[in-house]
Amino acid sequence: MTIIEELKWRELLADCTDLEGLSSRLATGPTTLYCGFDPTGDSLHVGNLVGQLTLRRFQLHGHRPLALAGGATGMIGDPSGKSAERNLLSREQLDQNVASIKSQLARILDFDCAVNPARLVDNATWTAGLGYLDFLREVGKYFSVNMMVAKDSVRSRMEGDAGISYTEFSYMLLQAHDFYHLRKTLECELQVGGSDQWGNITAGTDLIRKKLAATAWGLTFPLITKADGTKFGKTEAGAVWLDPRKTSPYRFYQFFVNTEDAMVPSYLRKFTLLSPAEIAPLEAAHAANPGAREAHKALAREVTTIVHGRSASDDAVRASEIMFGGGLDGITESLFSDVAGEIPTKPLERDRLSGAGLALTEVLLHSGLSPSKGQARKDIEGGGIYVNNVRAADASRQVSAADLLFGRYVLLRKGKRSYVLLSVA
């Protein structure tokens, strides 16, 4: 299977400037390609994963990927897909964001490969010394305003109430210059990006053709959406980030394990490096019994491993198992803290657990899991109450300091999924 065949199979090929010509070029030997990531924040999010994984897929097929951190274009902001002007960032903010994003890119691409190592480039390095008049002479003269206005990313903004500033209008030229520079200095022949980047990418291929009389290709992948067509990568709590300090590996895992049933097969193809032979049985099992969640778990495990590593992925799986009643033996406090963040928490004074402790019926009433002591007793006798995920069999059980996890928590569960965490202080 060629890289183009793989992209088609994974439904990751939206458009190409010349698919037949690109396929022929890729068949002749390694090609250098790039994908850009603007550092408008200090972390990339799951919506950026498709671009990173596309570079990785090309690398696995023997090609040479360049990941571009837009230290220069990030100062402007890409109008593509935006209905309003971005806030301009300071140079210091951008430098910090670029440093953070570079480390995230390095987790997915192989920069130590002996044959075709990936490279990180920053367009600030070749744009910083370029004067405004030089830019107009060397780049601006090759573009007509008519052509620029016809691009979807510009036209949609011009038709809106807010309009578009000259600053963002110029973004297309900066990105075209990036492609031109990489084609001239690093023999980069292909730019990949989301379908909303089509106008910017083709501006680059046009500039290369006019200035270098050289061939270059553009290829886009579709923007990922949810089953209802809404934007992918958002939760009630906000965006799902690749930085573990902003979105923990456990919450990252949960985002993918809770994927809508209808989207699981598509996401397995788009967000994992699993082969068709590995995905086929998962798709079959999912079609037969989506409730078993075998494919959901495989998707979440694979993507979490790609982004955060095997150890963090294993911890996320373990934390998820705890939420389904798994044992707590050997769990670390940091891992338990991830779980605790997902559970309703109720404070409890430490002195109430001193000595023999507090009756479990009172604890259940205090937590809100049972509406009365009488109902609490019935819940315990019915086998539906768990303390630290261990079933409480005796209605006369006491909860004492000996039950504290890490010296400050008691995990209560009623039934399969009703949890309350007592925070003892």
Image: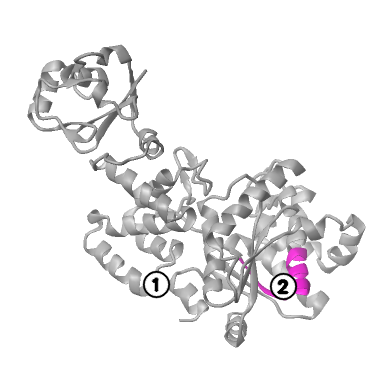
Callout 1 amino acid: Ser
| Part of the protein shown in magenta | 176-192
Give residue 61's position: percent from left, percent from top: 53, 77
Q: Which mark is residue 205?
A: 2
Q: Which residue sits at x=52%, y=49%?
A: 242
Q: Which residue is mark 1?
A: 275
Badge 2 density bin: few <14, some 14–19, many ≥20, Cα 10 Å: many
Does the magenta segment cover residue 183? Answer: yes
On screen, residue 95 versus residue 256, left or right, reads right
Q: Which secondary structure class fits the magenta region best?
A: helix
Q: Residue at x 90, y 64 (%)?
A: 137
The quarter of the image holding the N terminus is bottom left
Relative height, residue 360 to residue 297 (above, below): above
Residue 97 at what x, y percent from top left?
Answer: 66, 46
Q: Position of residue 121 (x, y in %)?
A: 70, 61
Q: Is residue 288 above or below residue 206?
A: above
Of 65 and 23, nearer the camera is: 65
Residue type highlighted by circle 2: Thr
Circle 2 sits in a helix, a strand or a loop, which is it? helix
Q: Identify the residue shown where x is 77% and y is 59%.
A: 174
Image coordinates of residue 421 in percent, x first then y, are: 31, 28
The local secondary structure at tag 1 comes to loop
Out of 126 and 137, give the one closest to the viewer. 126
Residue 147, can we see it? no
Q: Is residue 300 above or below residue 356?
A: below
> Marks 1 and 2, how far apart in space?
32 Å
Q: Is residue 291 left or right of residue 64?
A: left
